[in-house]
Image (cartoon, rainbow, N blue to C red):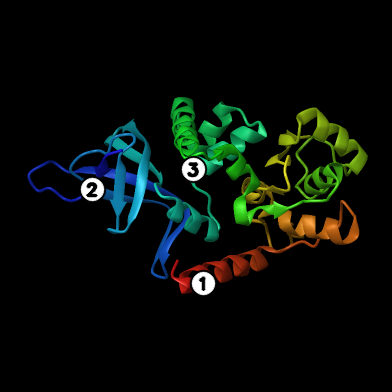
Amino acid sequence: MNEYESHDDESAPQISVRFWLGECWTEGPDVNLDGDFEQEVAALPRIGEVVRWQESHFFETVAVLHHVTSFGVDYHAFLDPAEDAARERLHRLGGLCLRDRFVLAHQSGTPISQIAQAADLGPSDVVRYMREQTELAAADGRDLAAEVTSGGTEGVDIAGLDTGAVLAALWNHLPTAEGEREAPLSAEEARTLFDAREGRVDTLYGRRMQVVLTGDRFNAWLYNHKNAVPTGWGCGSPGAATAQAVIEHLRATGDVTGAPLRSNTEYGQAMQARLAAVLESGH
């Protein structure tokens, strides 16, 4: 990959580009990039080039899209951490890089078209990027799919638990989909569904899960991000349960329902504490 630096060049016409760095990418207490930022550059980065940001962070260009409007052309460059250390830091901050989002969703059974739509990218961009990243990992003797779906050190531990109970507990603590089943799943029912899907569950009875439960640990980021975080819920909402809380409750009680719920305020406090801990560590 070539390195691209978005330095100003007064001799060239400037192009306004909105760079997407990813949710939860936080550089310090005064810089919180929750999504993207706009910058004037002399030339558009090309797919595969690395963008240097704040001199010390490197992001790979996943795609560059343009939209024609009545005011002209808008450019949007989608970036992803180009180094493992940056990906791990983003994880600790509560985010997940595009690479891992794509791989996790794909491994759970989510169609490529839906993955692309959620990311505002074209299906070909998603397929190409996943293929390139998988091949790079394989060249180093690594199984990227296994690494991502297990969640690494952030993965939820389900070793020793009944697979049917795990699936039932996770499903029971998600919001009911409109017009879909409301009655709780039993461990016995879920075990049959688990076997039929070989532990890879995208959506079940209308509830989006996006989990791979084939090992001793699983990556719960998409599960939590899409369903178990009470973002936007009113003050009267009962709250939501994270995958970790659901599994801890299951392990302690054997019950696939009744895990403690967390309010929107409690979720915000937990995220602030997590952010502060990472910033204080200096990593």
* Tag 3: amino acid: Leu
For this view, does 41 lie left or right of residue 94? Answer: left
Image x and y of residue 55, in percent: 27, 58
**Which secondary structure, mark 2?**
loop
User: For the N terminus, which image quadrant?
Assistant: top left
Cβ atoms at labels 1 and 2 below 8 Å apart: no
Disc 3 is placed on an element classified as: helix
Task: Give the number of the disc on residue 276.
Answer: 1
**Of all residues shown, which one is farthest toward the left?**
11
Kind of residue indicated by mark 2: Glu
Viewer-proximal residue among 20 and 97: 97
Tell whether label 3 touches label 1 (CB within 8 Å): no
**Would you say 236 lies left or right of 62 here?**
right
The x and y percentages for residue 5 are 23, 48
User: Is 31 or 95 nearer to us in this picture?
Assistant: 95
Q: Do the residues labelled 3 and 2 touch (CB within 8 Å)?
A: no
The three-letter code of the residue at mark 1 reads: Ala
Where does the image place residue 40, in percent across and percent down from the top left? 22, 48
Q: Is residue 199 above or below residue 160?
A: above
For this view, does 26 lie left or right of residue 269?
left
Where 101 sits versus 23, above or below? above
- Crowding near pointer 2: few (<14 within 10 Å), some, many (20+)? some
Q: In this view, does 229 lie to the left or right of 54?
A: right
Q: Mark 3 points at which residue?
A: 98
Disc 2 target residue: 5
Secondary-structure class at tag 1: helix
